[in-house]
Amino acid sequence: MAANDTNSIRKLLTTCCEIETLAGEFYRALARLHKHEPDAAALWLKTASEEDNHKLQFDLCQRLSVMIVSGAVLDQEKADRALQLLRGAIAKLETSAPTVPSALRFAINMETMMMEFHMEHAIVFTSKDYSKMFRAMMDQDCGHIQTLKDFLSRYEAGC
Ligand SMILES: [Fe+2]
Ligand SMILES: [Fe+2]
């Protein structure tokens, strides 16, 4: 069930913050694993800092939620499952290091699946102005699926 009361919305936004935090941790773990491939490590760190920004935006949204959020599209159960998936992915990195292309493919799939967790798809705002404001913040760093795809193409082409 999508949340539409204050407590459920707060809980959902907390879970969304945790998802972004774990996404950042996931990419930082890849940067450590691929530290001998500087271009890949730099891409993972840049992606991690974009996830950190998403986390800050959810923090802000949560703090203002009573005033600016009227409901949610995203189900709590779906958000909980995404959190578990990320925890599993991070735990897996501790036992086996993926190659750069396989990590890129996994990240592209994960990001595509997680699109619905981005704020503009997950949250209903009380005013169009708030959704515009958050969309403007997210647009600055939301293109990272394409960046990962471009990097994978260049990597596979050997350049
Ligand atoms: Fe994100
Ligand atoms: Fe992301």
Image (tube, grey):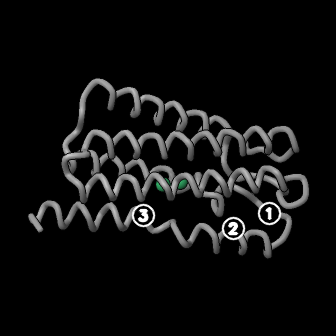
Q: Give the Cα distance between marks 1 and 3.
A: 24 Å
Badge 2: residue crowd in 10 Å (few <14, some 14–19, many ≥20): some
**Residue that mark 3 sits on:** 144
Badge 3: residue crowd in 10 Å (few <14, some 14–19, many ≥20): some
**Residue that mark 1 sits on:** 125
Ligand 2 contact, mark 3 (Cβ < 8 Å): yes
Which one is earlier in the sequence, the residue at label 1 or at label 2? 1
Task: Give the number of the mark in front: 1 or 3.
Answer: 3
Q: Amino acid at mark 1?
A: Phe
**Percent position of residue 158, x then y:** 9, 64
Q: Amino acid at mark 3?
A: His
**Residue that mark 2 sits on:** 134
SS of the residue under disc 3: helix
Q: Amino acid at mark 2?
A: Phe
SS of the residue under disc 2: helix
Please tell me which residue lies in front, 75 or 63.
63
- Classify 90 as above or below 153: above
SS of the residue under disc 1: strand
Badge 1: residue crowd in 10 Å (few <14, some 14–19, many ≥20): many
Q: Give the Cα distance between marks 2 and 3.
A: 17 Å
Q: Residue at x 45, y 68 (%)?
A: 143
For the C terminus, give its image quadrant.
bottom left
